[in-house]
Structure formats: C-alpha cells, structure tokens
Image (cartoon, grey):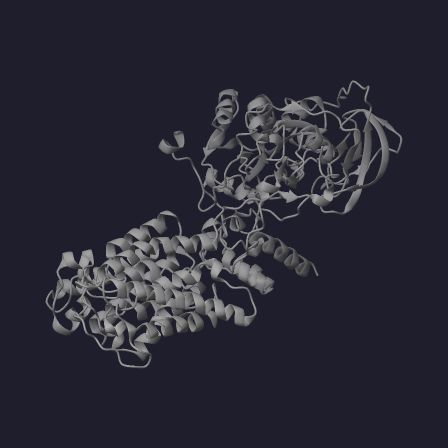
Amino acid sequence: MPPPDKTLEIHTSPHIASGTSVDIIMRNVVLALLPACAFAIYLFGLTALLTLTAATLSCLVTEHLLCRARGGASTLGDWSVAVTGLLYGLTLPPGLPLWMVVTGGVIGVGVGKFLFGGLGYNAFNPALVGRAFLQAAFPVAMTTWYAPLGADRFTSLPSSTLTFPFASPVYDVVTGATPLAAMKFDGEVTAATELVMGLTSGSTGETGSLLILLGGAYLVARNMMNWRIPCAIFVTVFVISGIFYLVDPIAYPSPVFMLFAGGLMLGAVFMATDMVASPLTGLGCVLYGALIGALVVVIRLWGGLPEGVMYAILIANAVSPHIDGLIQPRVYGTRKPGAR
Amino acid sequence: MSTFFHRHQSFGHGVHPPESKADTCRSKIRQFPFAPILVIPLSQHMGKPAVPVVRQGEEVLRGQRIAKADGFMSVPQHAPATGIVRRLGLVPSISGQMVPGIYLKPHPGSSQETIEGEPCDLATASADEIITAIQSAGVVGLGGAAFPTHVKLQPPDGQSIDTLIINGVECEPYLTTDHRVMLEQTADIHTGIRYLLKATGAERAIIGVEANKLDAADALRAAVPADLPVSVEVLEVKYPAGAEKMLITVLLGREVPSGGLPVELGVVVVNVATTAEIGRLLPHGRGIQERVVTISGGAVGRKGNYRIPIGTPLRFALEQVEVSEDVSRVFLGGPMMGQALSSLDIPITKGTSGFVAFTAAQTGDRPNEYPCIRCGYCVDACPIYLNPCELGLLAKNAEYEQMADDFHLMDCFECGSCSYVCPSHIPLVQRFRLSKAIVRKRRAN
C-alpha cells in the first residue's frame, strides 16, 4: 500500500548525486601526500616526523578553536585543514624549531584561511601564507638545511628542533646547502640521479619528486586534480630555462635541474592546484600554470633568493580571480566567449 | 564492448550517472487496468487549457473527445475510458495547486473498445490537414515537455524545415519507455515519420538513439522502408544527450543560437514516442487516451513498462505495481530532471514518461552542504558551457540581472548536471530555476 502523503519527502531534482564530496576529495589529497611524508621521515628522521606532526596539529587546533570562537560548528570534518597542515609541514626545513612551526601554522590558517572566510574563500594557499610569514620572520632558520640520511636521525633530535621560543636555534649536526643554493651561491651542480631520487638537502617533503608525481598521478586519475596546472608549470619552466641553457650552459642550470631541484614538484603538484585559489576553466589553468612557471624561472635565475616557487604561486593566486574574469567558457550558441 | 572499439558521436561536457535501466528495459509494455476513477486535467500541455464539451453525468465512450482545443496553442482531450462524467471541477496537480479537470468513472462492465474518428489518409492528406489531425489527436511532446506537437511543425514565416530529428535518446536514468516503444512499435514510428515528413516538408529524418539501446537502433534500421529517407544514428551514452540542443549538435554539428529555436537551423525535433503515437493514432482518427510509462525505483515491486490510461491516479498505479511501505520519495520523470511529488492523488498525464519511487535507503540522508571550493566540476559538466560556479555565487547574492546579462542564465535548460557533480552539494540547478523565474517576472513587468 502506498503511504499517506505526509511521509513523502520533497526534494528538488536531481534526485541522484555523483557521490563525490569535499571531504572525500580532501581525504584523497591527504592519502596522495602520504608517500612524500614517509619519504621525508626516511630522509630526515625524527625531526621530520615532529615537524609534520606539529605543523598539522597546529593547523587543526587553530581552525577548530577559531570556529568555536566564532560560535559556529567546527569545520575539521571537511578535511581541508588537514591538507593544509600536511602541505605546510612538507614545505618547512627539517630541524626548524617547533615553536616556529606552530607559529606559522597558526598564521597560515588564522590569517591565510579563517580571516578570508574559511574554506572556499581563501584567496591564497594557506599553507604558503604560513610559510611566507616564517620566511619573512625567521629568514636564517628558514634557510638552514640539514643533510639527508644522517646516521642518528632516528635516535636523536637536532637541538634546533626543540629550541625554546624566541631563543636563537643552535645547529649541531651537519648542515648542507640545497641544490638550488649550491647552484646559486657556489655554482655547484648536484648530480642528476641524486636530484631525481631526492637524496638531497631541502624542505622536509620537497625532495621526493617521484613520490610527489605518484601522488599527483593518483589524484589526476581520480579527477581530483587539474593536471593542466602542473603540466603548464613544467612545460613553461622547461622551455624558458631550456632556452637560457642552450644559450649559455655554464651560466644557467639545465632545464632538468630546474624541474627536479627545490620545491617545484611539490609546489606545482600540490600547492598550485589548490582548487580554491586556482582558476576554473581549462585555459585559465594553463595560463595560471604558465605564469607560475615563468615567475619561478625569473626568481631563481635573477632573483636574490635561490628558490621562488612559493612567491610565484602566491602571486599567481592573486591573479587567479582575474584570469577567471577574463576567460569564460564559450557558451553554447554564442559566437564569442562571453558574448552577450 | 562495442563502444570500446567504436567511438559513438557525442557532445562536449555532460555527466555519466548510473543508467539504472536494466530493471525495466527488457520488460515488455503491459496494459494497465482502469482505476475506479480517472482524473483528467484540462491542461496537460503547454499553452491554453482545453475546454470541456461534456456535462456532469454524461456517458462517454473511450476515445471520445471530452474537451476541445482552445485556439492554436492548445490541444483537445479524449476520454481514456468508457464511463460516466462524475464531475467537472478542480483536480490536484503536481504544482500543489488545484486545476480545472474532469473526473471520469469507467464502467466496469464495458468492453472498453475505442471509438474511431475520421482517419487521416497519408496518401491524400495535405500538410495542413496532417497538422490539423495531429492537433485533433491531442498530440503533445511525450518526452515530458508536453509542448503541442502541431505548433512546432509549423515554422514561422520565412523559415522552413529541411531536417526532422526523431529523439530516441532517452538519456534519463531509469526510464525505458522510448526504448520499449522503439522495439515494439517500430512500424508505428516509421508511419509517424511519414506523416511528419509530409507535414513539415522536411527532406530527411534522422533517428538518434543512445548506444545503450543498440537493439532498438538495429530494429529501427532493419524496418526502414526503402522509399523513406531515414537514417538511424547511435550516440555515446552520456547525459543529457537527449536534450534538444545536444542532439542537434551531435547529429548536425551545428549549434542552436542562444535564445533561438531549432527551426532557425531548419530542424524540428520530435520525441520517438510522440512519433509512434502519431503513426498509431492518425490512420484511425483516434486521440491520445493512454501512454507508455516506466515505473521503477527501489520501492517498486513490479518494475516495468505499462500502457496506462491518462488520468490514472498515481496512488492507484503504485498499488498495482506493489510499492513497498518504506517508499520515501516519488518523482515524475527521471531522477535528473523529475519533479518530486507531495501527493499521490495527482494523475498520470500526457507528459508523464515515467515515475520512480525511491526507498529511504536510496534517498539517504541529506548530505552536508559545504562552501563552493571552485573545483570546476560544474564548469566541466555543463553541456552548454555555462559557468555554474559563478552563476551559483551570483544567485546567492541575488545578482539576477548580472546572471542573465553576463552569464547566459536564460540559456540554462535545467538538466541538473551541475548539481549532480557538485562535491559541496550546492543545489545549483534549483538556484538557477528560481533565478530564471525571478528574471522572467521582472522582465514581464
């Protein structure tokens, strides 16, 4: 027997859904980041584990407390802050004093995300906002790098990790220049195999290029990442730096070096692709990626800093809404894009 | 899989919802019994309601005209059963409003034979006579829109029709009425095409069928008479391939201008079930008194395709197909565009291609709505390349004029693909429906 009408549920169409969800996407991004995290811990040991943990926890706690302070429900359930926390941790140098890690996490989520209005409204990638703050506030700590695969990395912590807040960190284990710094300041080229395998100094999670690409490929396969953005970045960096390398192979690094050194892989695959802060359309994403690639080359080759991925992405984040304003899909039945 | 080796024709964007057609696509069309009372709205079509020509207490014969067309943008209604007119009055409608209609009580003992009218002879009838016969038969688009068919067969002055497209795509999940009609009324379809070609003066007809109905495409192809300029084209399975604009673009490679009609391209699109009805009714001078309806969904015990008298209340229909007690949502049409019902007292009308009953387990809990994360899924889903993401934000801010002027809101045909893919579960298409209504109202003032 059909039921009385009052038990019928009214809902507007469509009555079915694809089953995807923001929290599912974010959980998959976390999953895709895990290989890079594991590699970071393998390379740098306990300090990497503590950095990643402190970074993630500081972001989670900040978001939770700010939501509560506003009087709303906690938004931890959408998992986006977990992505931010892990990504933020992966961009930090191993051995960075944990109080600095926590400070940057609070700034990244508090200023970079919450003040803008939370998920969906952050103009900039919050993880990079946190890192940019640290870069400005603690330039020395942010550019002191440990050599990977230290003998006692799983048994002891470098003393800098546990530096008391506001005290200057002391570096007691072997430090090493990143491939980009070695190139920029000493003109030394890192061997290609070491570079590609990621056995170099660098931020906690930026060196494992192949694992980063693996994570990215997983997300692309699940349609949770716009592949055009990293591809546009890679192609632009490769082409521009390739031209300079052809002109003068001694003064300029090779395009392969440019792709695998520093934070380019991590930035291109996981940072630039932040859905909120990147363009909507395919062509927009290509332009956005090309802009990032060009800025990376400019900063790396002619800037005062050895690395420029973070600033390149932040600048492109700012440009992204304008790219969306310029590039609209051509509506069916109209001649010109956006024609009225 | 044949689709693996042969890529079928398609359009850009679109979505791939589960087809859910296996439960009913092999179920032959079965005749439905008469309900104790039939509820016949006078407006089952777009345009002006029909005008009753019967009185309360009058005996009518099945197939007899009981309401006449009120002008050009209107069609008559025919008695779905031999019986007695119980009452002229207000009947429930899907909008929740009561609308004018006729209550008809079928005679239980009657033979229910259909009376015949004046046949429309294909060989001798002129184009105008065919068009009049189509209107007299009460024919409207049976795909769901219920637009009077005779109206679109007459191009405005200065325009002509060279191509007739028969829409056998049926891209809505669950629905299989067109599939069954193509298999079981193949000859009626080709007869209908003859009438339509003559009525429009079109030189050729193309039948578009989605690749999940290859048996229907084969049956239609095999039955094409040698003298009939008909081709059958197979389309990739993708929603909304059956939308008029998408179908035209796939088959002809041309786009219907924004705000325009297919006739501007010399094309008219007619649903395949409508075509079959024309082929079935006109040779006998009959009118539409029943239609094929898919009844499906998890709450339905006897899923299938049924030829159901117009005016059968849904409550009666659901009883007949043994709907389970945990039914939680019933909607007319398919799950992508179908309208949910608040009452089971409304009747099946000419535009009812099917209805689906979901259990509570199928509808599930209402998911969390998240903020828009600008993932762009909706932008990649919209078959007409609108920007639902931007439109959704503008709708939230009540910027209706900008939506219409800068982002082509009025071109949206509400297929629901954007809502279907949205990971934030934002009811995008519902916002657009409301926004369109607001813009229309403002422009009318």
Give the x, y percent position of residue B127. Answer: 64, 31
In the rendered image, residue A29, in percent from the top left (x then y), is placed at: 38, 55
| Residue drawn where x is 60% and y is 62% of the image | B400
- Camera-side residue of B394 and A25: A25
Q: Quadrant of residue A325?
A: bottom left
Q: Quick one: quadrant of the C terminus of chain B? A: bottom right
Q: In which quadrant will I find the N terminus of chain B?
A: top left
Q: Is residue B196 visible?
A: no
**A98 left or right of B34 in image:** left
Relative image position of residue B172 (x, y in whole percent): 55, 38
Residue A6 visible from this viewpoint: yes
How far across and how far down the image is residue A294, in percent?
27, 66
Residue at 31% x, 71% y is: A311
Residue B295 quadrant? top right
Q: Quadrant of residue B397?
A: bottom right
In this picture, is B432 found above or below B124?
below
- Residue drawn where x is 66% and y is 60% of the image: B443
